[in-house]
Image (cartoon, helix red, strand yellow):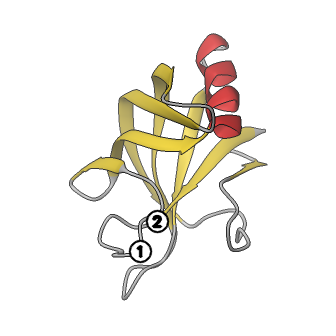
Amino acid sequence: MAFYIVVHHSSDPNQLWANEWEAQTLLRTITTPKNIGVMLAEAKANGERIFVHRCAWNTFPAEICCSALVSEVHDLDKTTALIRFTDVRPVGTPPPVTPHAGQSSYDARPPE
């Protein structure tokens, strides 16, 4: 199984978290709830590639926009973590599942 994080499209004006994108498809940095930070720290420790589920917005469909390795995990406060990614690669495939509103992550088979 692979670990997926769920993020808003970079053009969506209703951003709950601060994310840094390159060309709207490559995710470089995120802020996230600390529990997701813990899971991403585990992925980093295990050298696991994570996948980014970018939610649909306007005319853009939901997609697995990229995959990445976790390079840094920092606690910002008691509830928030800052995550930096490296070796970010475009993917561009349909998501394996539809997350429910408010869902920040899920496990699923990796894209083929």
Q: Where residue 92 appears, x then y in whole percent? A: 43, 59
Seen at 67% across and 67% down, the residue is 102
Seen at 48% across and 26% down, the residue is 69
Q: Amino acid at mark 1?
A: Asn
Q: Quadrant of residue 49?
A: top right
| Whether residue 25 is situated above or below residue 1 in the rendered picture | below
Q: Residue furthest top?
A: 45
Q: Between residues 83 and 98, which one lies in front from this camera angle?
A: 83
Label 1 near label 2: C-beta < 8 Å?
yes
Q: Where residue 26 appears, x then y in whole percent? A: 33, 47
Instruction: Find the distance from the CA under tag 2 to the CA under tag 1.
Output: 8 Å
Seen at 21% across and 55% down, the residue is 23
Q: Where residue 91 appears, x then y in whole percent? A: 44, 50
**Left or right: residue 14 compared with residue 112:** left
Seen at 46% across and 31% down, the residue is 83
Sequence-wise first label, 2 or 1: 2
| Whether residue 42 is situated above or below residue 12 in the rendered picture | above
Residue 112 seen in this snapshot: no
Give the numbered dot on residue 14.
Answer: 1
Task: Tell me if mark 1 has few (under 14), some (14-19) or many (20+) residues whose alpha carbon lies within 10 angstroms of its own.
Answer: few
Q: Residue furthest left?
A: 23
Q: Which residue is mark 2?
A: 8
| Whether residue 86 is situated above or below residue 28 in the rendered picture | above
Badge 2 marks a residue whose secondary structure is: loop
Badge 1 marks a residue whose secondary structure is: loop
Q: Nearer the viewer, mark 2 or mark 1?
A: 1
**Left or right: residue 97 compared with residue 27:** right
Q: Where residue 108 appears, x then y in whole percent? A: 76, 49
